[in-house]
Image: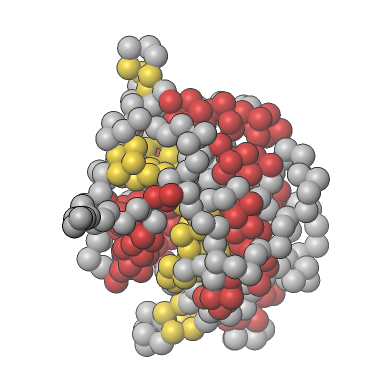
Amino acid sequence: MTDDPKTRILDLLRQMTPPDGGADVVSRGLVSDIFIADGKAFFSLTVPAAEAQRFEPFCRAIEAAVGKIESVSKAMVALTAEKAAGTPAPRSSAPPQPPRAAPAARPAPGGRPPATKPGIPGVDRIVAVASGKGGVGKSTTAVNLALGLSLLGLRVGILDADVYGPSIPRLLGLKDKPKTSGGRTMLPLEAYGLKAMSMGLMVDEETPMIWRGPMVMSALTQMMREVEWGELDVLVVDMPPGTGDAQLTMAQQVPLAGAVIVSTPQDLALIDARKGLAMFQKVDVRVLGIVENMSYFVAPDTGNRYDIFGHGGAKAEAERLGVPFLGEVPIEMAIRESSDSGRPVVATDPEGPHSAAYRDIAAKVLAELEDSRPKSRGPSIVFE
Ligand SMILES: Nc1ncnc2c1ncn2[C@@H]1O[C@H](COP(=O)(O)OP(=O)(O)OP(=O)(O)O)[C@@H](O)[C@H]1O
C-alpha cells in the first residue's frame, strides 16, 4: 500500500458510497485538490445543491475516516453546492440578466431604498448578505460581519432569512425560541451583543421544502413588522442562497441599503456570484461589494500561503464588474470550528488573526454605506 497520504485519501474516498447512491465522489470529479500541512488534510467536495444537506453527514464521515489514516491527524472537508440551492419554487422564466458593465446600480438618494418599501421602525439600514449558491460560507460571513460592525460601535441585528437551511441559531449558539411580547410582537434573541431572529425558529421543521418558498415573504414581513428590534444602526439579513424567485422577491420587497455577495474562488461559484449581482442590480439595490471566502490556506507549520481553490478570481471579477472588492477570508480550521460550535471567531477572539479579515470587511462595508449617504452641506450664505 502506498504511503502517500493523498493517494490513501483518494483510495478511501473511492470506497465510500455517497448518500445519493451514485458512483464514488472521486470518479465523479467532485473532490478538489487535497492539501496536507502539519498532518492536517484539507479539501472540498462539490455536490449538487439539492443534495447539500444529505451530504453533510457524509462529509463528517469522510473527516472521521480520513483522520484515521496514518500520518493524517485531522481532516477538514468543505462542502460546496453546485447550483443555486434552496430554490424549490419555480424558477423565473426570465434568464438571469448579464451584469451591466457600468458600476453597480445607483442607490436611491441617500442610499435609501425607494419610498414605496416601508422600512422597519427604529432600524436605520438593512444590509443583505447573499450568495449565488449554497455552502460558500454566506452565513459564517454574515455573522462575523455583523459582529465586526458591532465592534465598530454600531447597534447591530441579524436576521436569518434562510428558510431552507437556517444556520444563524447554530452559529450563534442560540437554542431558545423567541418569546412573544404582549402576544402580538416577538422579542429578538440576543447573543454576543447582537439581536438575532431566525425564520428557522418560526418554520416548523416538518414543513415540506416545497412550501417554504411561498412562506418566505409572509414570514419575512412578520420578522420586519412584528419583531421588537428596537433601535438598530444596521440589520444584517442572511439571505437564502441562490438567485431564484424567492430571492428576487425578497430583494425587491425589503428596503435594502445594500447587498454583500459572498463567493468562493472556484469559477463555478463566481458564475453564481455574477447572477447574484445581476439580481440586485435588476431591482436597483446597491451592491456594496464581493467577499471571497475560503480564499487561501495558511499552513500552520510554515505560515506559507496556498491557493488550493485557485485564489483571486473574486477580486478580478469585482474589478471587471466595477463593484468594490471587500476582502478575502482564508480557509481556517479555527473559523470552521468556532462557527460550528456557536462561538463565532470575531466574538470570541476579536483581536486574533482570524478576526482581522472580517473586521476589515466590516469597516469597508460601513465605508460603502456611509458613502451612499447624502453629503450634508453647510448652510449656504448668499450675498445680495
Ligand atoms: N473561511 C472558512 N474557513 C473554514 N471553514 C469555513 C469558512 N467559512 C465557512 N466555513 C464552513 O463551511 C461550512 C458552510 O458555511 P456556511 O453555513 O456559513 O455556508 P452557507 O453558504 O451559509 O451555506 P448554506 O447555503 O448551506 O446555508 C460551515 O461548516 C462553516 O463553518
Q: Please, is residue 232 above or below residue 103 in the view?
A: above
Task: Say which residue appears at 51% left-offset and 28% top-offset.
Answer: 221
How is colour applied across the structure in the image? Answer: secondary structure
Q: Residue lying at the far top in this picture: please name it.
A: 183
* Residue 20 appears left or right of 197: right
Task: Say which residue appears at 50% left-offset and 41% top-offset.
Answer: 114
The total number of labels drawn is 0
* Residue 190 shows in this picture: no
Displayed quadrant of residue 354: bottom left
Residue 206 position, x and y percent, is 62, 27
Q: Please, is residue 130 above or below residue 249 in the view?
A: below
Quarter the N terminus occupies: bottom right
Task: Say which residue appears at 41% left-offset and 79% top-offset.
Answer: 298
Residue 207 position, x and y percent, is 63, 27
* Residue 94 appears left or right of 325: right
Residue 98 position, x and y percent, is 71, 62
* Residue 349 shows in this picture: yes
Q: Residue lying at the far front in this picture: please name it.
A: 384
* Residue 177 appears left or right of 215: left
Quarter the C terminus occupies: bottom left
Residue 332 position, x and y percent, is 42, 69
Task: Say which residue appears at 41% left-offset and 23% top-offset.
Answer: 226
Displayed quadrant of residue 58: bottom right
Which of the two residues, 25 or 327, is positioned nearer the viewer here?
327
Which of the two residues, 314 or 264, is positioned nearer the viewer here?
314
